[in-house]
Image (cartoon, helix red, strand yellow):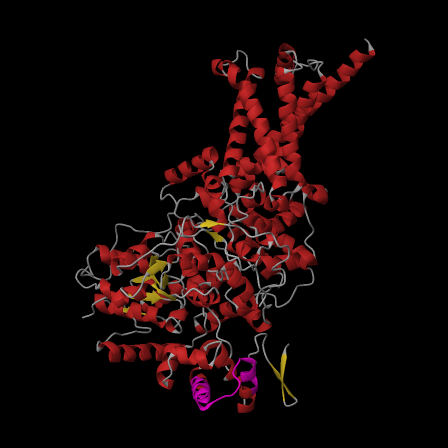
């Protein structure tokens, strides 16, 4: 694995949690690239399988279309003054030292092309700081727009709120249209259409998993905790990230215990058992198609409401649902509805009163990692904390400049959770790992399946002895079931 | 396309070394892949897990839930990590000839 | 007419032509760009959370962005100080320039007399600071390009020549004002015969022409940034609220 700078970047964490940016190391991460997509996957999701012959013209044409359709892109192409405020804010720069990972430098890769083809500066490329969209530029796009996790941290510190995520998304959209995409993202999207979820769990396996969990719960608790599948007429359709019913089973058990305790009828759907939306990491068309499936599943089963499970970018796409996929009027408000909001609503209604034993979590010193998407795109800042405070005695926050809207990405969001990017993932996760280390917590709670997959590896790599789990897991621990 | 060489027979594998066609799997191949996964020798315990994975995959077309794997084979997760250093989803599945689990794992 | 009279007449024609062209380029270019931002839709909700829940709150957030640069304050205190002083001084100096464009001159502009020099110098110093910051820090040096230096140098020259003609090699203000009012009322008046002033004017006109096609459009873009001007209103928590759990 390519090693990046190992010196800590959180300066005197015990005092301030101040960040110390590393020295610039040009091209440090230039060679870390995603595997290109496979024809079988691209064919399934309506993308060209290889670089199309007239790729330059088509890319520029697509760029022009996006500029006319997306105010954010148009404004962000012009507004940047290169003040440098963002240069020490991106975890991928902080971790790698590669200046192309400055948010501004990443965005400039696209702005150079914009200026070349869409502004008078293109007439004097050198002076006007414009560049052709050639082979070399395409390679840079492919490398560095897949070293951005679209986490929006830079946007918090930009005087104009320039959101690199929007620029990265546009660049990926353009690349996808000319046949350049990554194996990880396209494979996952293709699997959603084939099996209903990112992991590719077929319906029979999903049912088997759910039955297994019910039996396991019966053995452990003696209670008939059910994990219903495809139950028509259930009140709640829960759409978890599929990883909850595969790797993060404690979170899945959490949902089961919660609904069992409340005595509500709920179900999952084998048509759509994935909250995560990798279309967000690829292009608009697939973002919309994947999102549509949730409402379809809800209508098929006649659910009264749809609840999004613990998944970060699912919630980012989730809050777009009424805009992306049409009215949700036929479901009961509130909508879109996140499981954390649901739990907090239940707490406020007094549903758990007298049934929470906080001491059950006393072995844990809990800290909370804000997933970038739920915090900065989904406004889910207080709910998870309220749940933790209501279920745990020992809760500690990480330094202020690393939580809430200032949170660091785990290092693997935005379609980067793939093995070939491991050096970038471990480097990019460094600020997060150091902040966790500073708290000395032994339980790192979060509400995102990507974080839950990345963080254990990250903590191992940076030698932070901490267990990673969901927020609902803590609720389930402390809940006195009946 | 990357290949793996097994006694002169070339097999297609993906970029991460997972074989492309699970039907080409053989015990000999498993032993060969194991060496690339820091597993020197496939013990009886290893085989128990590998066989469970293969049986489950044949039945359901996917790797089993990790919790189920632990319960039905009787090894806890820690032991599995000791046996397969890169974990059940990567190391064990690769040796068992399953496709690589991908998504949020 | 002497040779020098002919020269000044030619110069006057040049500056008059350039002034009208620059004004046209500036106004038309600016409107065209702003219209471009305005007419481009934002297909999806895009507010950066935590965000105001109402339109009014979002307007306040943008107003805050325009006047106080809160994000920059969070990001880098030195840069914030430099940038804020730079912009505040620029606005003051521009405001002070109203005395060349209005008749009679509003009282408040006249009252600025004692502090005008201060703002002028402050502007120059802030520009120098920003220029030094570009060159002096490895990270900003890496991202700075010709246009960045060009604009700072241009603004610095505007400030320097402006200060010089105001406080050192005085230009005749009556000449300046009659020239500018002449331009505004489409009467041809000769330029003030003061080379340094003409240089000052020339730099400003170049800046005006360059403005709509450059990063100076951040002045308009800041109002149209979807992550800032959109309230977070994506969730329906309507009166129809009916939890599936009847007991609660």
Residue A333 vs C72, above or below: the answer is: below
Front position in the image: A458 or A335? A458
Which quarter of the rendered picture does the C terminus of chain C lie within? Answer: bottom left
Image coordinates for residue C91, horizontal then vertical, percent: 53, 26
**Which is more toward the observer, A4 or C151?**
A4
Q: Could you tell me residue A423's position as x and y percent?
A: 55, 64
In the rendered view, would you say A140 is above or below C17?
A: below
Q: Main secondary structure of the magenta part?
A: helix
Quarter residue A4 falls in: bottom right
Q: Is residue A482 visible?
A: yes
Outermost residue to the top: C1
Label total for image: 0
Q: Answer yes or no: is residue A45 visible.
A: no
Q: Give the residue displayed 59% in from the left and 79% down from the top.
A: B13
Q: Which residue: 31% across, 79% down? A: A211
Taking the magenta stretch, the answer to whether it contains residue A140 is no
Q: Is residue B39 magenta?
A: yes
Residue A84, given in percent of the width and then of the height, sits at 56, 44
Q: Quadrant of the N terminus of chain C?
A: top right
Q: Is residue C20 above or below residue A216?
A: above
* Residue found at the very far right of the displayed protein: C3
Picture residue at 47% right of the left edge, 16% below the top: C108
Q: Which residue is located at x 68 percent, y 42 percent? A: A128
Residue range (magenta): B32-56
Tell me which corner region of the image, top left, top right, bottom left or bottom right, holds residue C22. top right
Q: Is A343 positioned to the left or the right of C76 in the image?
A: left
Position above or below: B6 against C212? below
Percent x, y for residue B23?
A: 54, 87
């Amino acid at each position: 694995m390519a090693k990046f700078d190992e010196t800590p970047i959180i300066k005197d964490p015990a005092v301030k949690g101040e960040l110390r940016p590393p020295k610039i190391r040009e091209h440090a991460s230039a060679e870390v690239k995603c595997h290109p997509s496979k024809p079988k996957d691209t064919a399934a999701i309506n993308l060209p399988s290889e670089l199309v012959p007239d790729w330059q013209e088509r890319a520029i044409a697509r760029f022009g279309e996006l500029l006319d359709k997306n105010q954010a892109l148009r404004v962000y192409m012009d507004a940047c003054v290169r003040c440098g405020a963002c240069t020490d804010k991106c975890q991928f720069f902080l971790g790698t030292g590669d200046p192309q990972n400055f948010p501004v430098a990443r965005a400039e890769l696209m702005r150079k092309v914009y200026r070349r083809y869409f502004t008078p500066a293109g007439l004097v490329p050198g002076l006007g700081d414009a560049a052709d969209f050639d082979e070399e530029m395409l390679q840079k796009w492919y490398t560095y727009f897949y070293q951005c996790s679209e986490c929006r941290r830079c946007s918090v510190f930009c005087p104009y709120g320039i959101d690199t995520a929007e620029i990265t998304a546009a660049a990926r959209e353009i690349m996808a249209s000319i046949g350049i995409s990554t194996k990880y993202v396209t494979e996952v999207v293709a699997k959603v259409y084939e099996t209903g979820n990112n992991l590719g769990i077929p319906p029979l396996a999903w049912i088997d998993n759910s039955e297994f969990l019910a039996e396991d719960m019966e053995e452990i608790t003696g209670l008939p905790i059910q994990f219903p599948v495809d139950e028509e007429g259930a009140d709640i359709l829960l759409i978890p990230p599929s990883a909850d019913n595969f790797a993060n089973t404690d979170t899945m058990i959490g949902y089961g215990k919660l609904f069992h305790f409340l005595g509500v009828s709920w179900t999952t759907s084998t048509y759509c058992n994935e909250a995560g939306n990798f279309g967000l990491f690829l292009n608009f068309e697939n973002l919309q198609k994947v999102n549509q499936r949730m409402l379809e599943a809800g209508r098929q089963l006649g659910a009264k409401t749809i609840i999004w499970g613990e998944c970060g970018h699912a919630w980012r796409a989730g809050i777009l649902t009424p805009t992306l996929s049409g009215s949700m009027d036929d479901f009961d408000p509130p909508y879109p509805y996140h499981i954390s909001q649901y739990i907090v609503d239940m707490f406020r209604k007094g549903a758990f009163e007298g049934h929470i034993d906080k001491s059950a979590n006393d072995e844990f010193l809990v800290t909370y990692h804000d997933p970038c998407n739920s915090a900065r795109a989904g406004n889910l800042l207080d709910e998870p904390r309220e749940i933790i405070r209501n279920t745990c005695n020992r809760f500690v926050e990480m330094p202020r400049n690393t939580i809430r809207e200032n949170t660091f990405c785990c290092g693997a969001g935005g379609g980067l959770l793939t093995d070939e990017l491991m050096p970038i993932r471990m480097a990019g996760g460094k600020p997060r790992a150091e902040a966790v280390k500073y708290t000395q917590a032994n339980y790192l709670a979060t509400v995102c399946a990507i974080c839950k997959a990345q963080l254990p590896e990250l903590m191992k790599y940076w030698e932070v002895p901490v267990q990673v789990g969901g927020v609902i897991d803590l609720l389930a621990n402390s809940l006195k079931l009946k | 396309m990357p290949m793996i060489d097994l006694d002169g027979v070339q097999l297609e594998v993906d970029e991460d070394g997972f074989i492309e066609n699970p039907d080409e799997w053989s015990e000999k191949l498993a032993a060969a892949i194991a060496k690339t996964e820091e597993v020197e020798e496939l013990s009886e315990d290893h085989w128990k897990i590998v066989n469970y994975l293969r049986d489950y995959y044949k039945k359901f077309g996917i790797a089993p839930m990790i919790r189920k794997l632990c319960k039905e084979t009787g090894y806890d997760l820690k032991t599995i990590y000791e046996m397969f250093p890169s974990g059940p989803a990567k190391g064990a599945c690769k040796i068992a000839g399953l496709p690589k689990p991908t998504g949020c794992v | 007419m002497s040779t020098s009279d002919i020269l000044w007449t030619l110069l006057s024609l040049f500056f008059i032509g350039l002034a009208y062209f620059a004004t046209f380029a500036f106004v038309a270019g600016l409107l065209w760009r702003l219209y471009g931002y305005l007419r481009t839709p934002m297909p999806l909700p895009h507010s950066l959370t935590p965000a105001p829940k109402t339109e009014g709150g979002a307007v306040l957030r943008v107003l805050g962005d325009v006047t106080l640069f809160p994000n920059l304050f969070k990001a880098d205190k030195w840069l914030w100080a430099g940038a804020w002083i730079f912009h505040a001084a620029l606005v003051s100096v521009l405001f002070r320039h109203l005395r060349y464009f209005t008749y009679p001159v509003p009282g408040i502009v006249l009252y600025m007399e004692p502090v005008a020099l201060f703002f002028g110098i402050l502007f120059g110093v802030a520009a120098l600071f920003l220029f030094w910051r570009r060159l002096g820090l490895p990270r900003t040096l890496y991202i700075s390009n010709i246009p960045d230096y060009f604009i700072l140098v241009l603004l610095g020259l505007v400030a320097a020549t402006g200060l010089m003609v105001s406080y050192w090699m005085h230009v005749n203000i009556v000449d300046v004002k009659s020239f500018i009012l002449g331009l505004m009322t489409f009467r041809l008046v000769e330029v003030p015969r003061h080379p340094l002033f003409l240089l000052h004017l020339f730099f400003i006109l170049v800046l005006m022409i360059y403005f709509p096609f450059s990063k100076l459009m951040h002045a308009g873009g800041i109002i149209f940034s979807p992550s800032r001007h959109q309230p977070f209103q994506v969730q329906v928590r309507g009166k129809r609220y009916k939890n599936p759990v009847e007991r609660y």
